[in-house]
Amino acid sequence: MSRAESLGQNVSGERQPPALYLLFFVEMWERMSFYGMRALLVLYMTAATTAGGFGWSRAEALSIYGWYTGLVYLTPILGGYMADRFLGLRKAITIGATTMMIGHISMAFTGEFAFFLGLACLIVGNGFFKPSMATLVGSLYQEGDRRRDAAYTIFYVGVNTGAFIAPFISGTLGERVGFHWGFAAAAVGMFLGQVLFQLVGPRLLGDIGKYPRRAAANAANAVKETLSAVERDRLKVIFSLMIFVVIFWASFEQAGGLMTLYTDTKVDRVIFGWEIPTTWFQSINPVFIMTFGPLFAAMWGWLALRGREPSAPVKFGISLFLMSLGFLCMVFAAQQSEVNGKASVLWIVASYLLQTWAELCLSPVGLSMVNRLAPARFATVIMGIWYLSNAVANKLAGFIGGFAETLGEAQLFGAISATAFVASMVLLFGLSKPLRKWMHGVG
């Protein structure tokens, strides 16, 4: 029995559909490519031209990184609309993955034109791929199926399995052989994921995700263009929590920008005389996700059986509190590096651990919540809108990271910690009760 199958049975007590494990492995390959490229991106832009990079400043690189990661989460609105209205989920996934593969291939060539063309393809392709994959997971289950939350945890482990492997392949090739070899490896990962999806998908998925959701609903005379009062209330919950999701991801995404640069220059990465490659630190979070993901899912299930599971808004509040503690660790790291020149690697590991716990309280919970609260006829569009908060957050993350050179790292990390703490208190003690009321029984 695979790790994914074991997780599915342990959390829900029931066997998950085989199609879920297909999506698990497809997502693993696709995310391996995405995160492999992301691990190299800032290092590539700031590396000297003699080392194969562009030699851009940290501020320039972080600004471009912010634009890229922001737009990656903006295009799912259009991609979700196209999937719901015209394409269907499976065709949208194929278009998205193919476009991203072309983007990785482009980045395997030298020159600014190839670089920006590659980023553009990745941005557009992700817009089709990301919301459609997340919605396809939920489409495997009927309304009220209690296996759905466990399914999203399994899916999320797939995301992070790919993210864990990526730095060791693309990251190591990029740092030790050449950046363009790392980008080429990412293209191979995208190709393998799509081969698996095209060969196995038709047999396991049947007609699920094959046709546009809005078209199918119209054929069944099931579309109501006006929203009911309950649907409007539930959408209020989604849009309200997006504000706090922006704060979370703007903090979390420092890992790919500011924290990567900080780790590269101000963290003692030498263990037993060997220096750990900077990109390998990108695997810490996925390792913790794979370790603690099943435990968190089991914990929520255990609490649910006793009627004590926190609502989604409370989980979001807990998430932001843990994020605050994670960046408090970075404050201590920055203070140590100011005094000693280098910070202990343990501060970085502790920060990633707390950020991972925070992520597990928010990201898979949010995907499941949106899938349950959004009207079925607009599900992929609403999932795309949900990712809009990630778009704003990622652009904001790059903007915030650029202040490290003027404010100082300790001060900036402290400001991020304080912001997350205040947001957590607002959610936990101010908004959780009214938001739960608007959810109308959907926890």
Image (cartoon, rainbow, N blue to C red):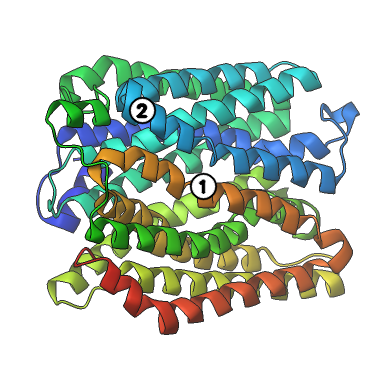
Rate crowding at label 2 as few (under 14), some (14 to 19) or many (20 or more) other CA atoms within 10 Å: many
Task: Please determine whether, in this image, residue 301 is positioned above or below residue 414.
Answer: above
Q: Say whether residue 342 is left or right of residue 189.
A: right
Task: Please determine whether, in this image, residue 292 is positioned above or below residue 334.
Answer: above
Q: Say whether residue 419 is left or right of residue 399.
A: left
Residue 396 on image: x %, y %: 67, 54
Residue in front for this viewpoint, 256 or 312:
312
Residue visible at 37% across and 56% down?
A: 366
Residue in front for this viewpoint, 245 or 318:
245
- The numbered disc on residue 146 is none
Residue visible at 17% across and 19% down?
A: 203
- The numbered disc on residue 388 is 1
Residue 335 on image: x %, y %: 78, 75
* Residue 271 appearing in the image: no
Residue visible at 71% across and 34% down?
A: 175
Q: Quadrant of residue 401?
A: bottom right
- In this figure, what is the number of numbered marks? 2
Three-letter residue code for mark 1: Leu
Task: Please determine whether, in this image, residue 175 is positioned above or below residue 393.
Answer: above
Residue 148 on image: x %, y %: 20, 50
Q: Residue at label 2?
A: 83
* Residue 195 appearing in the image: yes
Q: Quadrant of residue 357?
A: bottom left
Element under disc 1:
helix
Residue in front for this viewpoint, 149 or 127:
127
Element under disc 2:
helix
Query: Where does the C terminus fall, quadrant-wise?
Result: bottom left
Residue 110 on image: x %, y %: 77, 17
Query: Where does the N terminus fall, quadrant-wise?
Result: top left
Three-letter residue code for mark 2: Ala
Report the Cα–Cα distance between label 2 and label 1. 17 Å
Residue visible at 21% across and 38% down?
A: 139
